[in-house]
Image: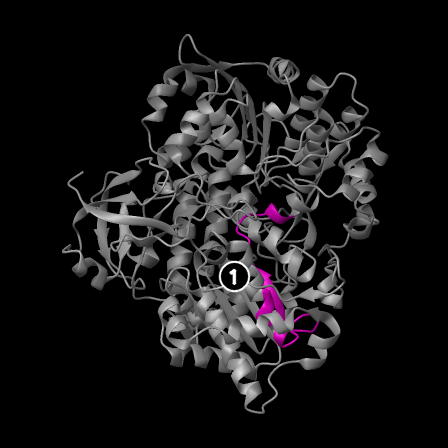
Amino acid sequence: MAQDRPRYKSYGSPAGGWGAAAATAKVLFEQSVVTKGSRALLSMNQPGGFKCPSCAFPDAICTKKLEFCENGAKALAHEATKFRVTREFFAEHSVSDLMKQSDYWLEMQGRLTGPMRYDATTDHYVPVSWDDAFALIGEHLRALASPHEAEFYTSGRTANETAFLYSIFVREFGTNNFPDCSNMCHEPTSRGLPHSIGVGKGTVVLDDFEHAQAIFLIGHNAGTNAPRMMTPLVEARKRGVPIVAVNPMPERALIKFTEPQDIVQMATFGSTEVSSEFVHIRIGGDLALLKGMMKVMFEREAAGETVLDHDFIAEHTEGFVALKADVAAQRWPDLVAAAGIDEAQIRRCAEIYIRSNATIICYGMGVTQHQQGSQLVQQIANILLLKGNYGKPGAGISPIRGHSNVQGDRTVGIDEKPGQAYLDRVRDVFGFEPPRAEGHHSVESVEAMLAGTAKVFIGLGGNFVRAVPDTDRAYDAMRKLNLTVGIATKLNRGHLVHGRDALILPVVARSERIETAAGEQFVTIEDSMSNVTASRGVLEPASEHLMPETEIVCRMAMATLPDSKVDWASYIDDYSLIRDKIAEIYPALYADFSERIKAPLGFHLDIAPRRRVWATPNGKANFLILPGLAVNAPVADPDMLRLATVRSHDQFNTTIYSYNDRYRGVYNDRMVLFMNADDIAARGLEAGMKVALETISADGIARRVGGLTILDYPMSRGSVAGYYPELNPLLPLAHYDRTSGCPAAKSIPVRVVRAAD
């Protein structure tokens, strides 16, 4: 497929529908798991089954429907694949040879089957026993001059039980260095929202979509990144609920969508027009839109109307006067210029919001991945506070997190900035004194590697080196390490960009059964709406030499901490003991965990703002100010464009399923640049031309990616887009939100350069 001739053809059909059904069948066939995969799909996201290894959107309460989407099916098919990466594979391919292969090729080789160790003399991975692998990890960690010389990464695929034990192991070892996949996507939610409403999570549950009177979708592409979200959106639209989509590029699923489970729509080739209003915002223009909407609300109040919830504001909030003054200071010409849309549309959006008595605002990485993403999230919280859109049915803030259990990992302890009360509980429950100093987030961990102060990297899932910014520098950083450990299901780039010593440790996948000496075990997952459910794999493990992630964590701890105060061996076999400890550490959230998790649909964690309780220092929800209209540092270059790196439809995070992106009309290519026609013409370029992108950066480092084909695409003026991880080399390591550490991947200042490469 990768060698086929690139084609670019606009996609006019609805998203979903027969296209999604055909894609699901195709991927099951390609991975040779038609029968096995189809059976497993019937158990995915169902009570007694396993949770989708893809997105974090919650399951529908009705369990009579199939609860999987096209991208969930792709994730399962690639996990259940018949293809295997064996000892013989590593004997045949050197690491240098594997580095020449594409990310797609690496993914398509299949499941890892046994532990491997890098042999520098031959440049091959060679077999290693599990015992020797753990001994090597323990040897390296104990040899460090300081525990802070190790970095412990976590992927959102990690279950609660594993993440919890990982956090305890690392803290007993002596550091809070927890670079995490959430650092690169929704960390502004975790760091920004608590100052506003007292919790770094959304306040909406799935049932709220049935009661909403208006829904705003800002900076995310549900049809690709959380396709199961399309069902409640379509149902809301059928009820006449206005849906406002805000994005620099139109996304097909938010224009028209056919529900694959709707027999009538499928039979008649029907569809639903999802968005009632598409707001073609400029990259970074969300702040101007929000302030413009609030300005309309204050204007209406000044004219004698009552559009704000004054009782709610008086009883539950602080900072209203300062917010009003900040919004009043904004001039309409400046708001229009910053947003990239006209005043009339801003006023229409405000009118939709004003008329609604229950509004949900959903947002994604188009909001969070800016240099002031944390403060931008707070502005969404502000506008919701003005009408009391918390603590009532059909209303609230809803971050759409993109990876299954990325939120749960944070809840149970994967946090480089842990609270002191939490650390006190760890001390009291486990009997050791945990470190009190803040650790590293993902960007800081790469900086530590470059500086030579980090020596060991352990990756609990994920593909860290392809996910982080500044690819070339990240590669250099990883190669400086003494040891890298990749705990994974599939081969990826992170196993090939490694330290002097390196291990690949293959794990039992989410869809596979976990059998221990105590019998079959299950794990738990928290979705993006704070519902915790059990996950029980149904397939046989891909190899008899795989090990559950939880056991890997326990055995790393046992090999590293011979005098540990924790009974690690007991947690290898009985996961209920882990849940009991989670309940001890988090009594307010997880009391009676072992009993509550027996409910078929799980249970919701308490989110205080749903009760109009605010766990802030002043006990109030706070209006917080972001002065001006810019969420990114200005750039003087007049040719500057803002680049947003995006996923294709056949992609999940750094995992590439194919070279196609059918909803955007791209086939057999990933090196493309989506660009507005006027921006193309203004630079004397043409669609189809090969160009390069160069980063405009003040750090003096030249960053360039060539071989990009210009596609005439309805981007907003001044905005361009292309795929990650291919364009990650353009994202400077220092271009991130200082509050959260989240890279500003949706607003990279670039220039387009004519190039033949």
How far across and down, in percent of the image, does residue 153 sit? 57, 33
Is residue 427 depicted above or below 625 in this figure? above
- The residue indicated by pointer 1 is 363
Look at the image and tell me in which quarter the C terminus lies: top left
| Residue at x 46% of width, y 44% of height | 653
Using a 10 Å C-alpha cutoff, classify the residue at mark 1 as few (fewer than 14 neighbours), some (14 to 19) or many (20 or more): many
| Residue at x 79% of width, y 17% of height | 563
Q: From this viewpoint, is residue 326 visible?
A: yes
Look at the image and give the residue range highlighted in magenta. 381-407
Look at the numbered disc 1 and give the secondary structure of its residue.
strand
Queried whether the magenta region covers residue 472, the answer comes back as no
Queried whether the magenta region covers residue 399, the answer comes back as yes
Is residue 527 depicted above or below 77 in this figure? below
Is residue 363 depicted above or below 466 in this figure? below
Q: From this viewpoint, is residue 240 visible?
A: no
Q: Residue furthest top?
A: 121
How far across and down, in percent of the image, does residue 85 sit? 45, 25
The total number of labels drawn is 1
Left/right of residue 703 with respect to residue 567 in the rendered view: left
In the depicted view, which residue is nearer to us: 12 or 734?
734
Say what amino acid the circle numbered 1 marks: Tyr
Look at the image and tell me in which quarter the N terminus lies: top left
In the depicted view, which residue is nearer to us: 313 or 627?
627
Left/right of residue 477 with respect to residue 574 in the rendered view: left
- Tell me the quarter of the picture where residue 682 sits: bottom left
| Residue at x 43% of width, y 51% of height | 24
| Residue at x 85% of width, y 35% of height | 428
- Tell me the quarter of the picture where residue 88 sits: top left
How far across and down, in percent of the image, does residue 234 sit? 50, 71
